[in-house]
Image: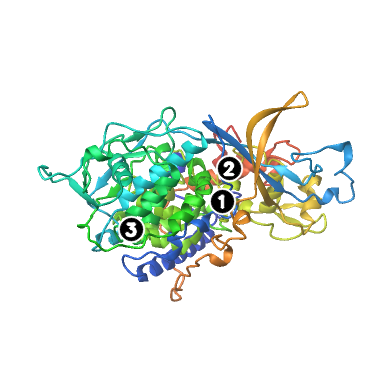
Amino acid sequence: MHSSQLPLIGCEDDILIPTVGQINTTFTTGQRMWSSYVSSAKQFPHGALPACCLQPSIMLKDIPPLPENIRGKRLISGQALWNIPCPELANADVRSSDGLVSTGDEPWDPEHVFGAQKSFCLWIKKPIMCGISSESTFRKDRIPGPNGLAILTLCWSYIFSVRLLKMQHRRIEYSAIMSPIFTCSFDLQQKDVILSLGYSSKKLVRWLCAILAPGVGWLAKGSVPPWTAHCNQDVRFIISTELSANEIVQEEPPSFTEAIDLILELCALYNFGSQPTEAFLTALLFPFHATQDLQPRLPLPRIPRLTKAQHKAPVYIRDYANDIRYYMTLSVSARFVSPAIWSIFWEPGIQSNVASAWLGSVHNVLQPLLEAANTELLAKVFAFRNPRLAPLWLGFLRCGSSQVLDMIGRYLTTHQEHSPGWSLGYPDLDVAAWTGSKQSFLDEECSRVYKGHDVLVSTADVLRHRFNFRLADKDTFCFGWQPFGTIKMEQIEPELWPRLESPSPLRRYIQWVWWLDKIKVDECYVYKTAIEKGFLHDKRASTRGADESDLIHTTPQPLPAQPTTGAVPIGLFMQGPSKQATLRVLRMGSWEASGDRTLDNMGIPEVRKHGWLRGEREI
């Protein structure tokens, strides 16, 4: 048995392993906190969702839009620019020295530091094939009325894809595969779903014949956009219309703008309620699913006979369309969505060596929901936990993949959502800034200002400042849990002293820089850049911008006071998450600001002899 699979057992006076008291306190705190979320979620009306779930823009904050012109590109790169105060340079005239300039001919500023460069892959290997399930774990799907979530999701899949193709200057076309048109002589089958469109436009009828086709009804030559999805043959969609197949066959695929008009035309036929937003969020998570080979399972559509009554199409669909390039930046890669999704289980102040106890407490509370596959209640629980992440979790759960619940359970027991032992859910500094939702102790400010050379400094504060010297490095940390312990100021490299003694903020996000085409300037080749300040900056003059005041806060009902329980049963959770998180902290903390590396930098005597480091050659 690997040591990570052994139970976490407290040990008094150990340099790494937590005490029994620390384990018990962490577990009971987590259990109490998450029980309050579940209690509040259960009190929420059945079939309804907290408002924050249906406000996608609350998760945008400083997200940059994808560049408008990316002709011919399958991959683009960018970097965040940060402001890192340098009090050690307070009396030095460095801004004008050497005549250095930066992009935009602004004076070089040593406090402006680039983060790690990130690449965005704009294609997937093959389209997602969506299944249709007659059994939905969302109770709201069983409420009488039209259920067009699957249909609307496939509409949004096309809209996301055609928007990217427009930015790449590529064309989209229909294939020969299409959903059949209903006729009097039609031989209906049990798996058929009839969509009545009445006297709808030719363009809408032809579009839905392609989108709901049993297979690839539309395509673009070349690489496949990450949101591309088609329906498998679990059901057969039949289009009922006053038009004949011959009347629509010459219609061209709609452009992005035309597709928005068409989805509005569809929504005017039926009262879909909040389903256009839920479908938008579901399609938003398609690249996430494609990267990890997850198959969406959408609820079986339930479309009543068309009546003459007209319904008001939701105007917010145009808001989603206007802001779609911001959503695309977050959505295009699982490597940016995953850190946001899995950070919902991170808690400030929880130290790395008790991570197992914290995650174990969450798993203990959520296990009945996971076993019952109650995804609607889970969506509400996560909304009470973190409103900013609620839309992402709703989209994740609405996709209906059978693997989602297993991934949650696996993450809470092993700290890795995939088996065997790999994860995309590591914290990301840029995504935390973009969404306004912290993911790690590195996203927090230092705990205090330190004066004097004989003081004890929080290890977490030391690592926060050391990290600022390696901001451009990739893969510098894998978990967000807080380091434990203290280090004497005299043991810390002098480069950090001025920063530890300064009340200045640790770090501030400034902007995102896209690195686009190379251009020739004065016989030299340089990159053409696009500088983006982010969603809130761009929308500040608009009432549509989701500012902090617009955020729907969900406050759990406090649970009645309970006496502290006894010791946590041994074997309830494994030591793996605590051990791996602690080893990552040691690895990260071993780097000095100068780049020198030694475990002595952590200030933990005899740490090399500890059992948790046995066989860990990298550290």
Residue 610 located left or right of residue 203:
right
Q: Is residue 374 left or right of residue 351?
A: left
The location of residue 407, given as percent across then percent down, is 39, 46
* Crowd class of label 2 (few under 14; some 14 to 19; many from 20; radius 10 Å): many
Which badge, 1 or 2, comes first in the chain's sequence? Answer: 1
Q: Is the residue under label 2 in contact with that under label 1 (CB below 8 Å)?
A: yes
In which quadrant will I find the N terminus? top left
Q: What element carries label 3?
A: loop
Examine the image and state in which quarter residue 588 appears.
top right
**What's under tag 3, amino acid-wise?**
Ala
Residue 525 against residue 111 in the figure, above or below = above
User: Badges 3 and 1: C-beta atoms under 8 Å apart?
Assistant: no
Q: Residue 359, image x and y in percent? A: 46, 54
Identify the residue at the far front of this view.
Answer: 247
Residue 419 visible in image:
no
Name the amino acid type tagged 2: Arg
Q: Where is residue 381 in the image (x, y as percent from the top left)?
A: 41, 62
CA gap between label 3 and label 2 equals 54 Å
Residue at 45% of width from left, 59% of height from top? 316
Q: Mark 1 points at which residue?
A: 352
User: Which residue position is annotated with label 2?
Assistant: 584
Callout 1: SS: helix
Closer to the camera, 280 or 115?
280
Please say if 522 is above or below 489: above
- Compute the Cα span from label 3 to label 1: 52 Å
Between 83 and 439, the one nearer to me in the picture: 83
Estimate the spatial distance between the alpha carbons at disc 1 and disc 2, rounded to whole Å. 9 Å
- Which residue does the numbered mark 3 point to in the structure image? 268
Quadrant position of residue 421? top left
Find the residue positioned furthest to the top. Answer: 523
Seen as rendered, the residue at the extreme bottom is: 560
Q: Position of residue 189 (x, y in %)?
A: 12, 44
